[in-house]
Image (tube, rainbow, N blue to C red):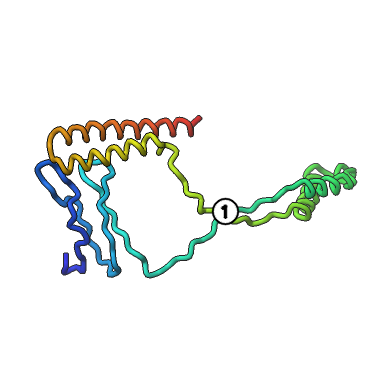
Amino acid sequence: MLSHGLKVESREPSRITATSVSCVDNIFTNIQQKTVVRTIELHMSDHMAQTLSFQSCEVIPEKKKTIEKRIFNTEKTYQLKRELSEVDWKNFLHNKNAEDGFSSFHELFVSLLDKWVPVKEIVIDQKEKKTSKWNTKELKDMKNKLEALQVVKTVRRDAESKKAYDIFKKIYNLKINEKIKENNENQIR
């Protein structure tokens, strides 16, 4: 690996059992910047996950998301209605055909909208962090309990602690799947 410019970033154990400790997930990289590797217990597998973090040399500015919309308020709506009420609508009815009449109406209506309620570009606030609808207080409490059982299992390294952890891990994963299913059903309705 070294001959290809790759270096091992982590030798931290990612699978710990009652009888062994091993690194089943290796991270190799050619990144020159300072890196940070973390081993995280997600309680979703028989081994832990690893993350690699580093700061990029190039900082890419975040693009602001925008939408275009008309902002109505009482005053603008009143002014728009007032001008529409002053239009001589007979001119639109006496056109040669319906298409010409509609085109004339549409042109007038859009010009009045643009005058009183112009289209504005609005920046969408992206700071609002999206939270998972299924990640409830109950699941957070269960995860905390699972973390505690993981510590006990790791320290004691006995069959009883492992069994308690494994049983609660199954219950936790079933509860996650139940909440995800419930959330998906609510989205369909």
Horizontal side, residue 184 vs residue 121: left or right:
left
Residue closest to the eye, 122 or 146: 146
Quadrant for the N terminus in the image: bottom left
- Residue 79: tell me if it is visible: yes
Quarter location, residue 155: top left
Q: Which residue is mark 1?
A: 124
- Compared with 185, 20 (above or below) is below
- Compared with 136, 24 (above or below) is below
Horizontal side, residue 45 vs residue 129: left or right:
left
Structural crowding at the residue carrying mark 1, measured as other residues with C-alpha within 10 Å and reported as few (<14), some (14–19) or many (≥20)? few
Extreme-left residue of the structure: 19
Horizontal side, residue 82 vs residue 99: left or right:
right
- Tell me where residue 126 appears, x and y as whole percent: 52, 53
- Tell me where residue 158 appears, x and y as whole percent: 12, 37
Residue closest to the eye, 127 or 57: 127
| Residue occupying the point 27% across, 49% down | 40
The local secondary structure at tag 1 comes to loop
Q: Of the residues shown, which amino acid type is indicated by label 1?
A: Ile
Quarter location, residue 51: bottom left
- Tell me where residue 101 appears, x and y as whole percent: 81, 45
| Residue occupying the point 45% across, 38% down | 133
